[in-house]
Amino acid sequence: MAAKQVSAIIRLVVNAGQAKPAPPVGPALGQHRLNLMAFCKDFNARTQHIKSEVPMSVMVTAYKDNSFEFVVKSPSTSYFLKKAAGLQSGGGNPGHKVAGVVTPKHIYEIAKIKQADPDCQYMPLESICKSIMGTARSMGIEVKGELV
């Protein structure tokens, strides 16, 4: 059997369980002639166990025969950091003003969630933690204490 030809790879951010054929999903998938209702139904079924306000990263692979498959990733690191620090947005002046504080335990918990992502599954947990700490610094979020 020959491999399917990929026509596009589409990256979207959709709230868990709330995919509908309206923007941003409709126009992004519609231009590649993909079945919007099939995507919405499947995505909502896969993410129904997650709170509805959580933004999920989705990577849709569209094929030339108008079929598709998609991978649902965990929310962005910045989303988790803002939740852990209790912030609405990151700091406006990172490096000079502290917008919030998280503990090494928060970093570790976020790293455990991110480790399940296809991009991070072969990375050591320590590397993921260091990456998350860098993201926190760039958002003006201070990490109190040292990782052990």
Image: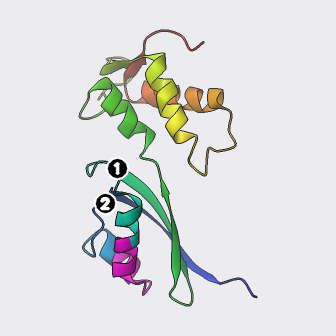
Whether tag 2 and tag 1 are in contact, CB under 8 A, the answer is yes
Q: Secondary structure at mark 1?
A: loop
Q: Quadrant of the N terminus?
A: bottom right
Q: Residue at x 40, y 84 (%)?
A: 35
Indicate which disc residue 50 carries: 1
Residue at far top of view: 145
Magenta part, dominant SS: helix
Q: Quadrant of the C terminus?
A: top right
Residue 139, percent across and down? 38, 30
Q: Residue at x 61, y 49 (%)?
A: 119
Q: Residues within 10 Å of mark 1 (few under 14, many from 20)?
A: some
> Relative to the observer, which residue lies in front, 15 or 136?
15
Indicate which disc residue 134 carries: none
Q: Is residue 103 above or below residue 134?
A: above
Residue 118, percent across and down? 60, 52
Q: Secondary structure at mark 2?
A: loop
Q: CA distance from mark 2 to mark 1?
A: 7 Å
Q: Quadrant of residue 102?
A: top left
The amino acid sitting under disc 2 is Gly
Q: Earlier in the sequence, mark 2 or mark 1?
A: 2
Indicate which disc residue 17 carries: 2
Write down the region rendered in magenta. 27-41
The amino acid sitting under disc 1 is Ile
Q: Is residue 89 above or below residue 121?
A: above
Q: Residue at x 39, y 79 (%)?
A: 38
Name the side, left or right, on which 95 lies relative to 18.
right
Q: Is residue 104 above or below residue 89?
A: above
Q: Quadrant of residue 57?
A: bottom left
Residue 28 painted magenta: yes
User: How many discs mark residues in the rendered view?
Assistant: 2
Q: How is the image coloured?
A: rainbow
Residue 128, percent across and down? 59, 33
